[in-house]
Image (cartoon, rainbow, N blue to C red):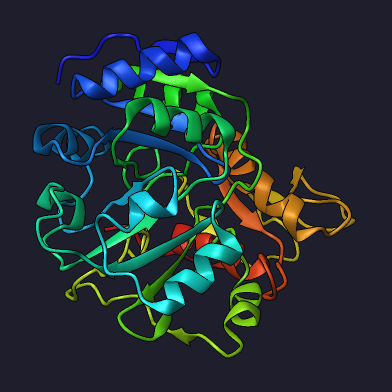
Amino acid sequence: MTETSPLILQADASGIATAAALLTKGALVAFPTETVYGLGADARDGGAVAAIYAAKERPSFNPLIVHVPDVATARRYVAWPETADILAQAFWPGPLTLVLPLLPAHGLSSLVTAGLPTLAVRVPAQASAKALLEAFGGPVAAPSANPSGRISPTTADHVLQGLGGRVAAIVDDGPCSVGLESTIIGLDPDPVLLRAGGLPSEAIEAALGGPLQAMASPAENEQVTAPGQLVSHYAPAAALRMNAQTARAGEVLLGFGPMTCDLNLSETGDLHEAAANLFDCLHQLDRLQRAIAVSPIPTHGLGRAINDRLARAAAPRP
């Protein structure tokens, strides 16, 4: 793949217009959402979607999330049960992805869904992302803008360091406010938690008035049913160890709460702050080229998603 330096675009009217024009031409554009930076392409263009997989070196069996500006657009592509309406009214725009059955004649590239009969779709809350989607006027497939399996990007610099010239342009709108990928809920037909994320499952259960089913991560030889389900994912170059009270020889310590450590996700023990800081802290520590030990993180609220990302980062590498 020939690489040239990407355009760095500001998240203003001119930058958004340039980014939309590039998407229209089938180019890859990295852009921020409230969760992480996404690597965007026209979801209807098979060549453009194939370029996402090539740039990320992403397995072709791993489906992508399609981003749209509103509910009306989402309903052009997927069946829409009452439960979807409840969740969309409560949490869209926001860090929630719904996996729903595809409608006939949806017009999307089959690469987006990895051949599955369902589509993962969401409406992002980031103003610049909404502006880009509206300016482009079509569905944008956008996984995280990083090499497959590596630490997700929450700044434009993370994208530049990870993908470099594999992307035509990067829209720079500062750090992501949520900092964790979206929560993914399957609705075919009953609600199932497919991936913990930036929207706590407790909030979803409150909106639904009942508990979510939880689906375990697929085994190595099983079909992935949603993005972010690979056992090894979000990983730094060096090994990562969870639930560490102290650092061992050769390790750096990523802390949580009041403590002595190399970097702290949140000195006050705030899970929202910790989620927003997680990937940036991992990027910073990864540059030290030392193994990373991580302090225990509570398992309620956003802590569930933080622990999910850390467990995947700590898993044996393929």
Residue 51, placed above or below residue 113: above
Which residue occupies 33% across, 27% down?
136
**Residue positioned most to the bottom:** 210
Can residue 193 be spotted in the picture? no
Residue 193 position (above or below residue 64): below
Query: Dividing the picture into quarters, in which one does residue 105 lie?
Result: bottom left
Spot occupied by residue 68 in the image (x, y as percentages of width and height): 38, 45
Instruction: Identify which residue is drawn at 43% across, 42% down.
Output: 69
The front one of 213 and 283 is: 213
* Residue at left offset 23%, top offset 46%: 58
Q: Look at 52% across and 36% down and name the residue there.
A: 289
User: Which part of the image, by quadrant, shows the C terminus?
Assistant: bottom left
Asked whether, in this view, residue 249 is left or right of residue 27, the answer is right
| Residue 234 placement (x, y as % from top left) | 44, 51
Q: Total label count?
A: 0
Is 60 on the left-hand or right-hand side of 286? left
Which residue is more in the foreground, 199 or 242?
Answer: 199
Residue 190 image offset from top left, x and y in percent = 38, 86
Residue 118 visible in the shown view: yes
Most foreground residue, 199 or 138: 138
Quick one: quadrant of the N terminus? top left
Q: Is residue 194 left or right of residue 108?
A: right
Of residue 288 and residue 51, the one placed in the foreground of this image is 51
Q: In which quarter of the image is residue 92?
A: bottom right
In the rendered image, which quarter is residue 169 located in? top left
Measured as percent of width and height from the top left, residue 64 is found at 28, 51
